[in-house]
Every structure is written in structure tokens, then in C-alpha cells.
Amino acid sequence: MAYAEKRVSVRKKIAIKYGRKIVRIEVADHEEFTIPEDLLCKRSKFFQKNLQPKRKPFGVDTECPICKAKLESGINELTFCANGCGHNFHYKCTKQWNTEKRETNQPVNCPFCRQGWPGDSKEIAVHQHHDISPRPFSMLIEWLYHGHIAVKDLSDNSDDEGIDETPEPDLHELIEAYVLGLKLKSRMFCRGVLEALLEITEETRIYPDQSDVRLVYDNTTKGAIIRLVLVRMYAQAAQGHWLKDGESIGYSRRFLRDLTIALLEKSPWERRWDLAEMKDKYVIGKMIGYGRKDGDEPEEMNNLSEELSSESESGEDEEMRS
């Protein structure tokens, strides 16, 4: 006898993948974004600290305290004790546990710490963060769902009129997004932004301008990978007139110092610092881009990077901890 395959509803699949609880983030200009809380907290230590301060990190709990089966994020729908211990559970296990407690007129509490268990609420909480600009935050939301920041292939000359697409980010928006990633302590988002930045620059041969450089240097510490990338871009591609006739006044003095060091370090016989190489080093993983605690730098970069990171050996790690 043939049995019909049990189907999983779309809502259930979304809950398993992204989490059940929804939050609304209100940013500058009172623009609001609705997103699953688990998805946001999983990729941002800032939001994890603010929205789920008691939750134990994913991977710490190897099994559900109720059924003793393995906890697998993305495969099973998970929840946690928000009022007490912060332990993670299978959602279906807590639902059954709470039902049994109600049926026997017992207090509905956490199976692990016995603190009261909050009921499922359909009300969506609004969290205000008016110091966050809408466009960089929308790029974060896009990245959370898709795992990358869309950059249009400029070599594709096909007619895309009439297609409703997300606006392609420009260089300044990407720099703002990188700074936002540091603020939100989202290491992987910073990498995604850096990859998009290098892709656009490689395609267009347009480079971050004075305001972009100043934004980076005003919001990062010495030794930050985004600084190294900007310095190497200019050392490779900058032309003399960029810094003539008072044009250098708009650049950070620290950037001009770093650029001078890079140019002096760059010997005529040294390999070109092309954009593909920078992407290989800083994004793909041949060089970990978040401070020297994560891994040693390649030998050919030691002199420059040691000079640029003499005041802070932890790069973005230090910023994300602050």
C-alpha cells in the first residue's frame, strides 16, 4: 500500500531555516525592516547581545535537554530559554513539554532551569536603531538571506529594462556597509562587502574617493584590512594628479602616511598588487582579514602589514569587541 509523502509547509520550512520569532528593526528616517530574530542574531554579535543576551551560542549544546537528540540548526527548528538558562531546545519538544504541563495544571517552565517559559506571542516587537542608515542595513538584510551582495556583471550587455532589481551598490554605499558590519560585529558580512567592493573596482577601475577613505580611517583602527585594501588600491592605480593642486587635503593624514610607506615598500621588481590577488588574500581566505590572531600573514606582506598594524595587532577584532 502506497502512503502519501508527508509534506512540510512553507511556513514550517521558513521557521526551520530562519527561526520562528520575527522582529522589526527601525533605522534612520523611521524606515522599518522585518526579519527573523534568529537569522539576524546568528550573524551579528551586536544584535545577539541586544535581542538574545541569555542564549547560549550555537554549537555549545550538543543535544536537546528534553529528547537528548542532536540539535542541528537549519535541520530542526530550535528555540531557547529566554527567561533563565539560555539553553537551546527543539521547538517541537518544548511545545509538547508545555502542553503536558498545561494539561496537568503544572507551571509551564524550562525543563532545564525551571524558570517560567514565555508563551508564543504573535506580536512583533519594534527595536529602534536610528543611528543606522537604511541603505547599508538593507544590504545586510539582502546578504543575510542570499549569502552575498549582488553586483551586476558589467560585461553583460543584455537588455534588463522592465526587470525590478535591487539597486546595485556604489562604492560609497559599500564602504558604509563595511563600517556598519564593524558596528554590528558581523565578521562574515564585512567579508561579503569587501568581496563586492573588489569586484566592482575590478570591473569599473573606479576607486574609492577622498570621502570613502576618510570614512574608513575615521571608523577603523590601524591594521584594519579595509585600510590595507585601500592603500594597495592607491599604490597600484593612483596617478600623480590625484594628489596635486591641493587634492591631498581631503585625505586622512594617516592614509597618506600609509600610502607613502606602501609605495616605498613596492620595489620595481615586486609582483603587481592586482585586485584579483587582493580578493584572493582578503576574502577567499588565503589571508584572514580580521587581525593576526586568526592566522599569520603571507611572507610577502609582513613588512607592510607590520608597519601598518604596529598600534593594533587585532585589526577589526579589536573594533568588534568594543
Image (spheres, rainbow, N blue to C red):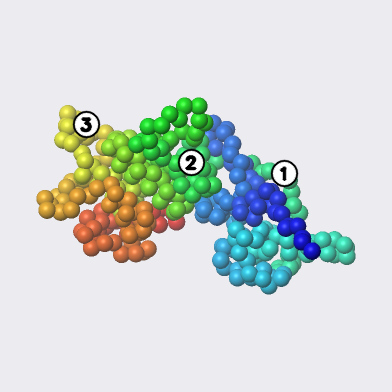
Q: Is residue 47 left or right of residue 255?
A: right
- Residue type at mark 2: give it: Met
Q: Is residue 194 left or right of residue 114?
A: left
Q: Quadrant of residue 5?
A: bottom right
Q: Is tag 3's residue or tag 1's residue first in the polypeptide sequence?
A: 1
Task: Give the residue number, with chain letter if any, for mark 2.
Answer: 139
Question: Label 3 vs label 1: CA separation?
Answer: 54 Å
Can I make out residue 308 in this image?
yes
Question: Label 2 vs label 1: CA separation?
Answer: 26 Å
Quadrant in which the N terminus is drawn: bottom right
Name the foreground residue: 107 vs 268: 268
Q: Quadrant of residue 63?
A: bottom right
Q: Nearer the viewer, mark 3 or mark 1?
A: 1
Q: Position of residue 178 (x, y in %)?
A: 41, 45
Task: Give the residue number, with chain letter if any, for mark 1.
Answer: 123
Q: Nearer the viewer, mark 2 or mark 1?
A: 2
The single residue placed furthest to the front in the displayed view is 1
Look at the picture and state if 249 lies above or below 230.
above
The local crowd at label 3, few if under 14, some if 14 to 19, many if 20 or more residues have their Cα within 10 Å, is: few
Q: Residue at x 23, y 63 (%)?
A: 299
Q: Position of residue 312 (x, y in %)?
A: 32, 57
Q: Residue at x 30, y 36 (%)?
A: 204
Look at the picture and state if 304 lies above or below 201.
below
The single residue placed furthest to the top in the displayed view is 161
The local crowd at label 2, few if under 14, some if 14 to 19, many if 20 or more residues have their Cα within 10 Å, is: many
- Residue type at mark 1: give it: Glu
Classify mark 2: helix, strand or loop. helix
Q: Is tag 2's residue or tag 1's residue first in the polypeptide sequence?
A: 1
Q: Residue at x 70, y 60 (%)?
A: 91
Quadrant in which the C terminus is drawn: bottom left
Task: Give the residue number, with chain letter if any, for mark 3.
Answer: 247
